[in-house]
Image: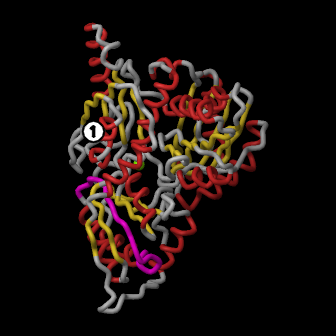
């Protein structure tokens, strides 16, 4: 039985019976477990089902309540396993379960398989009546996490920041941390409501439209009143997804920063500040990252998509920073769980380091044309289609693909990535090029290549 996708278990109307089984399975491998959740309306239901399974197998549970994923990941260092109940950026009717190791990394695929195997073989052993586990509530986890983050950031300028928490887990930590580093904070969507009344938790242009407009307006007022120099400059925005393991920034002009460009700017900052020799990113990141770092003595290393692959590469190449263009960034010099709050604070550090506004930094990064398309493909056909793409793509693009994750064709004036979605019945094509005509041509070739093998699309 396959339960885990690319980021733990995630589904619409997640059934508490599954949660119970996962809890029972985890109890077979872990004695001490810490559990946290985001604000979703089904969070309490899923949490209680998990706890019942865990208790039944004899685990002791520490419940740290509503917390961001990075807080759960940080807390996991004191336990055998951490469990976060969240569906991240998905709409409110979804929920999910993500398991964490002691070092703050998410479970690797082989660990998830072990849990799946226990569930499908019903390999459960109930604890005897006198060994049933117990539950503790720990309300200090947030404070400990916040103290830890504060010790590890260095911000001296009084910035102006709008923090948008999507009514979810970021609410309990993010605005307070920005205040603690001396920023003047306006928080929005910052009360807990698992229906996500303010905006949907995916941090994209559509969902952040009002926040962007607000920042633009705030700064226009500041410009009019000439108060930029006295009061820490113009506002920027930091917006989280549902569990605040990610963030995206909004610049002083009210523009949502391009995910790839922000990654490029921040990577350059890390290299210039610390002299790192390697930056980790994923196969789907823009060539803007390589281009913007090319005058520095640094290697841009690409891994499979997903935070587990990024954290493995951080260890392998002894690097301290790895980021995905989704806004999932790992700061290994601080901790190993992707952390959208820490990432936001470090954006301020970066602005202080360069003495520049975020919009200025963003405008230094080259822009390319990015096109994306998803082609329907049933899960059981994905392997065939990908084999076909790898075998025949060479003839179409005149280059042998890299196959770290899907097939990536690196061309002189751009690249094409064709990879199966880990969570949905699609094959995705992503293309980047210097001009639109080339990008469009590359995209069309990719779509044709996928469809070549698969007449069933038209049926
Ligand atoms: Mg997330």
Task: Count all numbered tags in the image, as a single digit.
Answer: 1
- 27 within the magenta span: yes
**What residue is shown with label 1?**
199
Depth check: give the residue in front, 263 or 229. 229
Q: Is residue 39 left or right of residue 331?
A: left
Which quadrant holds residue 417? top right
Query: Based on the displayed image, in which of its 4 quarters is residue 60 positioned?
Result: bottom left
Residue 305 image position (x, y, % from top left): 57, 49
The residue at 53%/36% (across/down) is 372
* Left or right side of 56 for 455: right
Residue 407 visible (yes or no) = yes
Q: Is residue 368 above or below residue 308?
A: above
Residue toward you, 266 or 99: 266
Where is residue 386 shown, x and y percent of the image? 65, 52
Q: In which quadrant of the rendered view does residue 122 lie?
A: bottom left
Residue 310: in magenta span: no
Q: Is residue 409 above or below residue 12?
A: above
Relative height, residue 115 to residue 308 (above, below):
below
Nearest the camera: 15 or 77? 77
* Residue 43, above or below 127: above
> Left or right: where does residue 376 sit relative to residue 453?
left
Q: Residue at x 31, y 14 (%)?
A: 230
Model colouring: secondary structure
Instruction: Give the class, few, some or many, for how many residues have Cα within 10 Å of label 1's Cα (few <14, many ≥20).
Output: many
Residue 261 placement (x, y as % from top left): 53, 29
Q: Residue at x 60, y 42 (%)?
A: 281
Image x and y of residue 82, in percent: 41, 65
Q: Is residue 111 left or right of residue 167?
A: right
Residue 451 can be seen, yes or no: no
- Secondary-structure class at tag 1: loop
| Magenta residue span | 26-41
């Amino acid at each position: 039985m396959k339960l885990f996708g690319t980021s733990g278990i995630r589904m619409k109307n997640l059934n508490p019976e599954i949660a119970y089984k996962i809890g029972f399975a985890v109890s077979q491998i872990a004695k001490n477990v810490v559990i946290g959740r985001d604000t979703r309306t089904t969070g309490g239901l899923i949490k209680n089902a998990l706890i019942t399974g865990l208790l039944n197998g004899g685990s002791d549970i520490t419940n740290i309540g509503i917390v961001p994923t990075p807080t759960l990941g940080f807390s996991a260092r004191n336990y055998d396993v951490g469990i976060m109940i969240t569906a991240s950026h998905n709409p409110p009717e979804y929920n999910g379960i993500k398991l964490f190791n002691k070092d703050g990394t998410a479970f690797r695929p082989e660990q998830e398989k072990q849990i799946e195997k226990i569930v499908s073989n019903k390999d459960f052993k109930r604890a005897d009546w006198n060994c049933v586990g117990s539950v503790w509530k720990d309300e200090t986890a947030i404070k400990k996490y916040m103290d830890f983050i504060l010790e590890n950031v260095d911000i001296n300028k009084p910035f102006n920041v709008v923090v948008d928490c999507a009514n979810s887990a970021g609410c309990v930590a993010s605005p307070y941390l920005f205040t603690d580093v001396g920023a003047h904070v306006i928080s929005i969507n910052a009360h807990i409501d698992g229906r996500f009344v303010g905006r949907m938790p995916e941090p994209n242009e559509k969902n952040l439209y009002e926040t962007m407009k607000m920042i633009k307006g705030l700064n226009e007022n500041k410009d009019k009143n000439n108060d930029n120099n006295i009061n820490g400059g113009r506002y920027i925005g930091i917006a989280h997804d549902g569990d605040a393991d990610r963030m995206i920034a909004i610049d002083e002009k009210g523009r949502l920063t391009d995910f790839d460009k922000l990654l490029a700017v921040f990577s350059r900052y890390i290299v210039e500040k610390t002299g790192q020799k390697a930056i980790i990113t994923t196969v789907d990141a823009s060539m803007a990252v390589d281009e913007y770092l090319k005058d520095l003595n640094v290697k841009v290393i690409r891994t499979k998509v997903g935070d587990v692959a990024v954290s493995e590469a951080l260890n392998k190449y002894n690097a301290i920073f790895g980021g995905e263009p989704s806004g999932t960034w790992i700061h290994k010099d601080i901790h190993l769980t992707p952390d959208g709050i820490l990432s936001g604070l470090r954006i301020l550090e970066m602005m202080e380091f360069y003495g520049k506004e975020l919009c200025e930094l963003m405008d230094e990064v080259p822009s390319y044309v990015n096109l994306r398309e998803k082609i329907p493909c049933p899960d059981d056909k994905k392997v065939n289609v990908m084999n076909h793409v790898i075998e025949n793509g060479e003839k179409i693009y005149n280059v042998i693909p890299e196959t770290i994750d899907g097939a990536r064709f690196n061309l002189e004036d751009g690249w094409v990535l064709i990879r199966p979605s880990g969570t949905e019945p699609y094959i995705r094509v992503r293309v980047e090029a210097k001009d639109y005509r080339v990008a469009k041509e590359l995209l069309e070739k990719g779509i044709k290549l996928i469809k070549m093998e698969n007449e069933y699309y038209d049926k």
